[in-house]
Image (cartoon, helix red, strand yellow):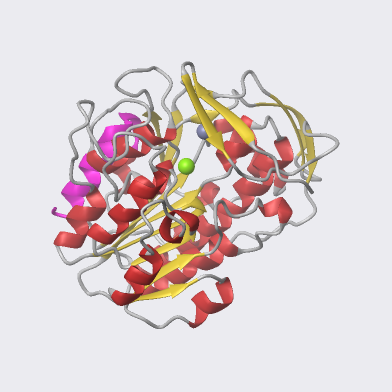
Amino acid sequence: MKNFIFLCLLIPGSLLAQDYTKPELADKTRYENKTFYRVKDYAKNEITGKKVKNIIFLIGDGTGTSQIYSGLVGNKGNLYLKTMPYSGFSKTNSSDNLITDSAAGATAFSIGEKTYNGAIGVDKDKNPKKTLLEMADENGISTGMVATCAITHATPASFIAHQPSRKMGEEIAADFLDTDIDLFIGGGKNHFNKRKDGRNLFAELHTNGYDTVTSMGALKKAKGAKIAALLAEEQLPPYLMGRGDMLPESSKFAINKLSKNDKGFFLMIEGSQIDWGGHDNNVPYIVSEMLDFDRAIGEALKFAAKDGETLVVVTADHETGGFSINGGDLATGVVEGKFTTGSHTGVMVPVFSYGPQAERFSGIIENTDIFHIFKEVLGL
Ligand code: MG
Ligand code: ZN
């Protein structure tokens, strides 16, 4: 396997260099799954209470209806996502474009305002706006983020950082030290300790009381009150190239850790690379990342069904690839697909929910509505 510098054309007029390794495959149009998993229907536990103590917000980057259905076919008709009782659609347009990028898409969730493509936690006039994660932290609620990309990448960055451009990785990393986030797990270590300004933010985090770890093995043993896990220098590898169960295991770890707080928690979990499969017009990349993300959803539902005061919401920032499914077999887990673009598209994306107040995410909503409902139900 070779490393590729992959130029990612996100939207017209915006060129973004992404250095990640993508799976090299002879046939990118067809995937035959070999690793099926059983799905338990945790969500059959009906939640009758209205109080929301915890929110687990799962974002599948670039995950439209076809990406979800490719996972459903790939796992022979079963997904944890399929067990969630409520669904709706989110309109994803940004303030300056029908087709959003992941920065504006995540900032819509984090500050409740449409902003320009590339914006990280700032409004359309580049003013920093307090994010949901920061509000939760200020109210004594535990906070955390888990991603399969660099933790400084657009989606997680938008919940904690305030920068005019997603390209400012080192500035975004420094913003992690301005919020008392309890836990974050992802890649991007280079933005913390190989910086132009010479600061070693990873060491500073340690001084600030974080357990700082760089491997899954060390993460599982970490017992500190606050945890910073940077598991790759840049992006984590794709599931097809050996990432293993990092995402579902980190999600389970994060839920277990954050749920110790009586005041509740807010946890954002991102299936970051479903988007990259779309950019690469790569069906196996999409399906494998979708199934990995679904097993993280399973961890969230398992906890929420037991807890009864946890709202679980799963959605996407946008669709990627104009992906469609043109063939396949539910009996064998074969998926065949085609694409209309190597960029994002403007279609609505599904929203799934479970737990108290879950019914509020039905129908067609704006991406910004998700912020406003979260803020209201957490009493922030
Ligand atoms: Mg993302
Ligand atoms: Zn993208």
Vertical side of 146 occupied by 366: above or below: above
Task: Report x, y in % for residue 319.
Answer: 51, 29
Residue at left offset 31%, top offset 43%: 359
Tell me where residue 351 appears, x and y as whole percent: 42, 39
Please say whether residue 372 is one of the residues in the magenta stretch.
Answer: yes
Name the outermost residue toward the right: 26
217 sits left or right of 368 in the view: right
In the rendered structure, does residue 371 fall within the stretch colored magenta?
A: yes
Relative placement, left or right, of 247 versus 92 is: right
Quarter where residue 104 is shown: top left
| Residue 342 relative to residue 149: left or right | right
Camera sees residue 52: no
Q: How many marks?
A: 0
- Nearest the viewer among 66 and 26 is 26
Q: Image quadrant of residue 257?
A: bottom left
Near-viewer residue (337 or 344): 344
Q: Is any atom of residue 300 visible in this view?
A: yes
Give the magenta-colored segment's residue range: 362-380
Q: Is residue 75 above or below residue 215?
A: above
